């Protein structure tokens, strides 16, 4: 017992600053803030598809060092949002209609069967746990906040898939949605289209609570359809 206490204390000491006062920001938290800012810039159109951005230039823009910017951009590269350009920086990905159609097809194959199984397995009241996420998405969409809606949309779908208890499915579904949020040819959904998309989350929850399985399947299929997102 005593040995376990010593080991636990050593871990705590590694993270707690030696001097009293506010803790200095850790690199991973800075990277997280930069990653969130870059996601916002991508979704909001501040970073142009096809353009190359260097880590030092972005670091100056956000008032940080280049290291967390590079780390954040590497994360975005793993999601397909940007591509590494050796000795230059990162090029914002350009998504074609074919890219989006293929992503939508894979999402339908994964998400729709999972939602149908969940619809028959979970008690109606469980679906109300997702209601705040749906409401947040509607609020972001109604205000025309594309970046905010992209995050709300991602949070809703990840929470929905997590109800399956399958961590791999949840991870893959979240990654596919990140890739699908890349607009083709600079096209971006207008506020009315964002709101229509967000409203489908609410409609899906309503059908799940009411146990209207045919309606659940229809909404789920339409929601991930590329035709529903005219990129």
Image (cartoon, rainbow, N blue to C red):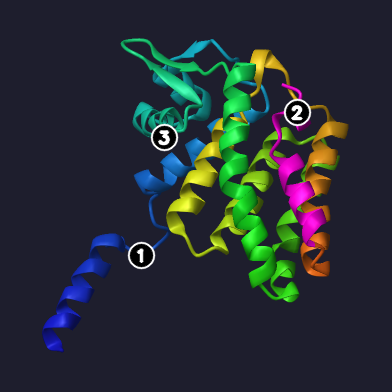
Please give the name of the residue rendered at 72% of the width and 21% of the height, measured from the top-left corner: 231
- Give whichever of discs 3 and 2 has the lower sequence position: 3
Q: Is residue 227 magenta?
A: yes
Identify the residue at the far right of this view: 192
- In the image, residue 155 lies at what x, y percent? 62, 51
Looking at the image, residue 44 sits to the left or right of residue 26; the answer is right
Mark 1 crowdedness (10 Å alpha carbons): few <14, some 14-19, many ≥20: few
Instruction: Give 23 or 197, whichever is nearer the viewer.
Output: 197
Q: Are marks 2 and 1 in contact (CB under 8 Å)?
A: no
Which of discs 3 and 1 lies nearer the camera? The answer is: 3
Which of discs 2 and 1 lies nearer the camera? The answer is: 2
Q: Secondary structure at mark 1?
A: loop
Q: Which residues are magenta?
A: 213-231
Q: Residue 85: name its quadrant.
A: top left
Q: Quadrant of the N terminus?
A: bottom left
Looking at the image, residue 68 sits to the left or right of residue 199; the answer is left
- Cα–Cα span, label 3 and label 2: 28 Å
Looking at the image, residue 140 sits to the left or right of residue 177; the answer is right
């Amino acid at each position: 017992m005593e040995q376990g206490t010593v080991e636990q204390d050593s871990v705590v000491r590694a993270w707690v600053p030696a001097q009293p006062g506010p803790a200095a920001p850790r690199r991973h938290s800075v990277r997280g803030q930069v990653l969130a800012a870059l996601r916002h810039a991508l979704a909001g159109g501040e970073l142009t598809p096809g353009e190359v951005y260097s880590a030092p230039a972005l670091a100056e823009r956000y008032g940080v060092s280049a290291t967390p910017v590079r780390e954040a951009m590497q994360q975005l590269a793993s999601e397909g949002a940007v591509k590494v350009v050796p000795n230059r920086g990162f090029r914002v990905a350009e998504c074609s209609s074919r890219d989006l159609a293929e992503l939508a097809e894979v999402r339908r194959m994964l998400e729709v069967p999972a939602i149908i199984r969940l619809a028959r397995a979970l008690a109606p009241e469980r679906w109300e746990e997702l209601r705040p996420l749906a409401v947040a998405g509607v609020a972001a969409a109604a205000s025309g906040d594309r970046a905010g809606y992209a995050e709300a949309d991602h949070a809703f779908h990840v929470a929905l898939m997590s109800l399956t208890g399958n961590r791999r499915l949840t991870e893959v579904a979240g990654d596919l949605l990140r890739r699908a949020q890349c607009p083709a040819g600079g096209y971006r959904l207008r506020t009315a289209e964002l709101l229509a998309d967000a409203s489908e989350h609410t409609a899906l929850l309503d059908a799940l609570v009411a146990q209207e399985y045919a309606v659940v399947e229809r909404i789920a299929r339409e929601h991930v359809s590329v035709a529903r997102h005219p990129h």
